[in-house]
């Protein structure tokens, strides 16, 4: 069945760091003109959906805020739906806190919160981790935006949210509820909105253990791009292959 809806990862698919991937702008514009339904699903939690849309506009790629699902937005939505009156201690950046505030969730800075929420924090320090650890020791629920060990930028890889979360896992002996890919929570939000059947949906990503695994879990088409994390050499070690492999988003027409 023909693809009608495409779900794009963002880091490594549309951009690397502060630079758009060649052909990303033109491909998105062409797909819009051809009336594909588009969503953008990212584990990144350092920006809000609004902030992520603004970043993309700065790269010349125009995406509506409502088309973007981030793990920061997903975490706020999850807490609002499941723990609506809870206080939250955050190890994370402005975008994650913005989404919590947008959802009316109380953020605290002490070690007796109802929830400890951890994402990528590029200004993390021992004081923040100590407060989060003590919050968990005091019985707080433990939520992680995602467990990505790294993320791609222009000149290679940087440590991801999973590095921050792992500190708390090892220190506390606790396992978090994980919001981001390959868990299905975020994509289920898209399935509820989409007008397409699952067999008409494709996910495009650069990471086998998140994007492609998520697609396999949900039984939708999967397309791996080699412009981000995964390399051709990595593919030789993978047992469950993506449906399609392309060099970058600029080659997407070849599989549609």
Image (cartoon, rainbow, N blue to C red):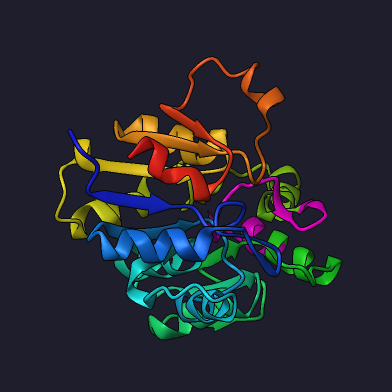
Q: In the image, 155: left or right of 151?
A: right
Which quadrant of the view contains residue 45?
Answer: bottom right
- The one of 179 and 32 positioned closer to us in this rendering: 32
Q: Residue at x 67, y 27 (%)?
A: 232
Query: Residue 92: x, y in percent?
Result: 65, 70
Using the rendered view, name the quadrant where residue 190 is placed. bottom left
Q: Is residue 54 inside the magenta stretch?
A: no
The answer to if 153 sits in the magenta stretch is yes
* Quadrant of the snapshot with the C terminus: top left
What residue sits 33% from the left and 34% below the top? 221
Task: Give the residues drawn in magenta, as a range.
Answer: 134-158
Residue 62: name its quadrant. Answer: bottom left
Left or right side of 220 for 57: right
Q: Observer-nearest residue: 192 or 100?
A: 192
Percent across and percent down for residue 148 are 63, 47
Residue 254 visible here: yes
- Vertical comparison of 229 with 234: above or below: below
Between 188 and 114, which is closer to the camera in this rendering? Answer: 188
What residue lies at 49% left-to-right and 21% top-to-bottom? 241
Whole-percent x and y of residue 231? 68, 32
Q: How many marks?
A: 0
- For the N terminus, the quadrant is top left
Residue shown at the point (55%, 33%) measured from the top left:
208
x, y percentage for residue 235? 62, 23
Say whether residue 74 is visible: no
């Amino acid at each position: 069945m023909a693809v009608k809806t495409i779900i794009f990862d963002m880091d490594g698919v549309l951009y690397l760091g502060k630079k758009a991937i060649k052909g990303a702008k033109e491909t998105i514009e062409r797909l819009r003109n051809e009336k594909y339904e588009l969503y953008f699903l990212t584990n990144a939690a350092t920006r809000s959906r609004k902030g992520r849309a603004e970043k993309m506009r700065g790269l010349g790629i125009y995406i509506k805020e409502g088309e973007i699902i981030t793990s920061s937005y997903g975490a706020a939505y999850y807490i609002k739906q499941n723990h609506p009156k809870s206080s939250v201690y955050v190890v994370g950046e402005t975008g994650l806190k913005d989404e919590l505030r947008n959802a009316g969730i109380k953020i605290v800075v002490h070690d007796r919160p109802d929830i400890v929420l951890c994402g990528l924090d590029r200004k993390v320090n021992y004081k923040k981790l100590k407060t989060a650890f003590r919050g968990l020791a005091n019985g707080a629920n433990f939520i992680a935006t995602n467990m990505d060990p790294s993320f791609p930028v222009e000149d290679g890889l940087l440590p991801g949210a999973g590095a921050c979360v792992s500190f708390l896992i090892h220190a506390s002996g606790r396992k978090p509820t994980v919001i981001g890919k390959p868990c299905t929570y975020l994509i289920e939000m898209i399935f509820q909105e989409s007008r397409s059947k699952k067999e008409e949906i494709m996910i495009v990503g650069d990471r086998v253990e998140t994007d492609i695994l998520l697609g396999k879990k949900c039984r939708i088409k999967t397309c791996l791009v080699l412009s981000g994390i995964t390399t051709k050499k990595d593919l030789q070690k993978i047992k469950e292959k993506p449906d399609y492999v392309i060099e970058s988003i600029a080659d997407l027409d070849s599989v549609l």
